[in-house]
Image: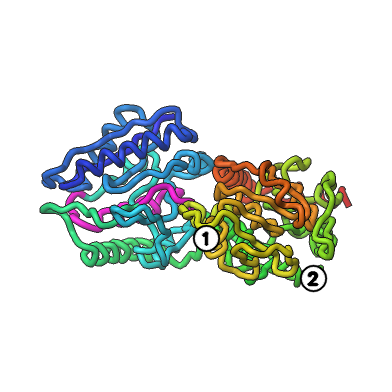
Amino acid sequence: MQCAIIIPIGPGHQTLAQECAQSVQRAFQESPGPFDDILVLTVDDSEGRYGRSRARNQAVRQAAEAGAEWVFFLDADDLLLPEAFRLVAPYVAHHDAVWGAILENQYGSSEIVKRAPQVDHIYSLRQLLDNDPVTTLQMGHFVKTRVALAHPFDESLDTGEDFDYYLRVWETQTCVKAPLPLFVNRRGAHSTGPRSANGVQWRIAAHEAMNRAKARLEASGIYGHALIGVPAGMTHVFRADATNAGDWWSLPAHYLPFANKGHLLDIAALRSDTPMHRNLVVGGGGLVSPHFPQLEQLMRRVDIRLIGWGLGHNMNVDVEAGYVEPEELRYPRYMERFDLLGVRDWGAPYRWVPCASCLHPAFSRDYPIRHEIVVYEHKRIPTGIDGFPKMTNDTGDIVAALEFLGSGRLVLTNSYHGAYWATLLGRQVIAFPFSSKFYGLKHRIPLCRAAEWEKHVAGCKVYPEALIEGRRANVDFLSDVERFLFEDSGSVAVKQRAAIG
């Protein structure tokens, strides 16, 4: 399968276009994802006579003639991210067009930030129409070539042609905006020329396109639908402690295109008769624990379909000693009652799907090393290690936690997520396991008593592949979850759970 990357080159963008094309080649070398080949199509409009729409439409026709099944529209002043092809892989089988989270970079600066505010997940046309266009979609996206041919850009428009096109595609095709970034929008190098426009003009044109789309939908009687094309009825259960970044940000619904994101339940408050939707996502977090009998109680219900996402072993805990000996991770029999299951523990008899927090866009940033050693403590379990910069996990601010962890070359921690996140950031880690959950970490780090950490410094390693592996596992699992949700297999699942008892 071939993907054509379409890059229109406007006035003043010739040098930027070379950097843009190089980013495409780097991404394909990093991982081709579902594609066997790529075709970079640049369209020279350096004098600005034709405009972006005509340039893109011309390139789409060239892509079709070359046999490319997909295209990616990339502006010359933007850059494709190295993981773009890999991250789109789980979506191509079930979608006609795929957008990602919007990252921004001021031209000339190395800092990349997530646009804020921003709607992270869009899975319906109604969502697109009910939000400020600045917060929703931008040009960089994958789309099937046949769809781009059927919905050409309006060449009469000098601005707003992008949003007019988006809306026509979303009206008729299966589309998604995933929370995973695909490209970087470089600011401060906007093209000029006789057909250019400013931000105010674009916003006016985008709202006019939205009003036209609303009028079309109201005439057809479907604008009132809350969601289009997404299975309704979903509950998300996790440890909803907003003061603990690890607990709070382990929820897959923070990052992925699920319905009913507002129906969140804290597992600590669940009762056997708690009302919930038919489809239930449990996780992430160390919920496989005697401290959460509610998980086993959920398994006794036959009116729901159960998905376990990023659940972790946490059966043996010693807070007083702050250390548990290495052990083989054994799981309660009730784990067999899940209809679909991924656990964060490596080597378990179940599919490996690590904590979904690896999908947070803050992991795409670079964090300068300012200290040789930092200490990241569990808020209730002091390490007794002093003399180094220290932070506890008594925070819901994952960005602050990542900035701190990234500031150290070596991270000493007794926090599971402290160890996991520092590994994803490419830092050396030594952890002090007060729970069996540490022994499920895939990327092996020294695990010891806090007082003995200095003996293990020489054994520290970094794992530059860890972040991509974690994201790939989660996005792959999403594909199976989507298939499961859209299939009417609930009756089979209930029978299987009842038979296990």
Which one is nearer the viewer's eye here, 221 or 93? Answer: 93
The residue lying at 60 percent from left, 45 percent from top is 470
| Few, some or many residues within 10 Å of mark 1 (<14, 14–19, 20+) | some
Whether residue 483 can be seen here: no
Circle 1 sits in a helix, a strand or a loop, which is it? helix
Residue 403's disc number: 1
Q: Nearer the viewer, residue 140 or 360?
A: 360
Query: How is this picture coloured?
Result: rainbow
* Residue 216 in which image quadrant: bottom left
The label shown at residue 271 is 2
Reply yes or no: does residue 53 show up in magenta.
no
Task: State which tag comes first along the sequence, 2 or 1.
Answer: 2
The answer to which image quadrant residue 302 occupies is bottom right
The kind of residue tagged 2 is Arg
Residue at x 33% of width, y 36% of height: 22
Q: In the shown orientation, is residue 238 left or right of residue 128?
A: right
- Residue 256's x, y, as percent? 55, 55
Magenta residue span: 155-184
Image position of 7 (left or right of 111): left
Q: Is residue 252 above or below residue 273?
A: above
> For this view, does 111 lie left or right of residue 357?
left
Q: How far across and how far down the image is residue 409, in percent?
A: 56, 51
Front position in the image: 170 or 354: 354
**Relative height, residue 449 to residue 461 (above, below):** below
Q: Residue at x 52, y 63 (%)?
A: 399
Badge 2 vs badge 1, beta-carbon distance below 8 Å: no
